[in-house]
Amino acid sequence: MTAAAERISGYIRPVVLARADSDTVPVAGDVWFALEHMQHTGSFKARGAANFVLAQQEQGRLPKVGITLASGGNAGVAGAWAARLAGSTATVFLPDDTPAVKLARLQALGAQVLCGGARYADAAAECERYAAASGALRSHAYDDPYIAAGAGTLLDEIAAQLPELDTVLVAVGGGGLLTGITVSANHHGIRVVAVEPENCRAFNAALAAGAPVDVDVDSIAADSLGARGRPPAEPASRAPAGARARPS
């Protein structure tokens, strides 16, 4: 986590914290919000993406063809932004129902945007095929040590501003933020509470089953929190047949 913080320092914005009004959040003690929507690209995803791309560049593993990843939108925007930091490019595979605002942001960042199918798992499979065929470096929206470590720098910054902090609530989604936050929280002695949509609890189901399992995606207010749980099956080694350019 320390290496990640040092690597992305100067590239990401330090977290802004805001105290909740006591009449809005009627609980004992102070409640604070981490305003990562003010981060570059609009989410915490910029932290992990920057850590991943810069680490690969340091190690000479960033190919000329750039990086590729599948995303519901936020991770793709962060990956495209991070690739530009390193003078590289990104090819992003999106599900068909990705919001237009995220597509527009990707295109503004110069990313090549391709359709990957109806679901994130389909997009991830197409991304794997593209990486194998093109030599692009496969990144991930959440399942990567560099991505998780970059996300975990958020809690280090929060703990530095709030030394009496004892508990953090973390939205799960795919689990990258939760992983990084938990590693950092263990170091600081802070309790972590994982939060999922009521009818889309992939993490809860995985804990009960002892392994990742698929769940229905429902009751989500934020499209990026609709994690199914199980990673996509390994695709056959072939060129991307189902990918197609996203329209402007």
Image (tube, helix red, strand yellow):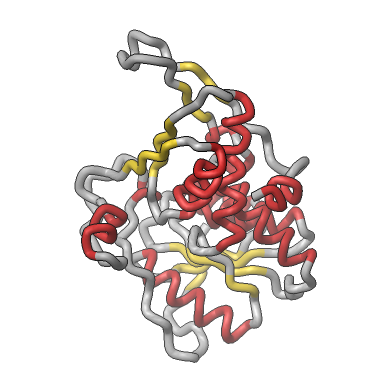
Q: Is residue 40 above or below residue 83?
A: above
What is the number of callouts on the image?
0
Q: Is residue 115 above or below residue 174?
A: below
Residue 26 image offset from top left, x and y in percent: 31, 13
Please indicate whether residue 118 sits to the left or right of residue 17 in the image.
Answer: left
The residue positioned 50% from the left and 37% from the top of the image is 189
Q: Is residue 24 above or below residue 40?
A: above
Residue 38 in picture, x, y percent from top left: 58, 32
Percent x, y for residue 218? 22, 50
Q: Which picture quadrant has residue 169?
A: top left
Q: Residue at x 30, y 67 (%)?
A: 211
Q: Where on the picture, by quarter, is residue 36?
A: top right
87 or 211, which lies in front?
Answer: 211
Q: Position of residue 227 (x, y in %)?
A: 34, 56
Q: Residue furthest bottom?
A: 237
Q: Is residue 94 visible?
A: yes
Instruction: Inspect this view and state whether residue 246 appears.
Output: no
Q: Residue at 57% across / 62% down in the picture?
A: 145
Q: Is residue 13 left or right of residue 243?
A: right
Query: In front here: 30 or 196?
Result: 30
User: Image point 38% across, 62% down: which residue?
Assistant: 96
Q: Residue furthest top?
A: 23
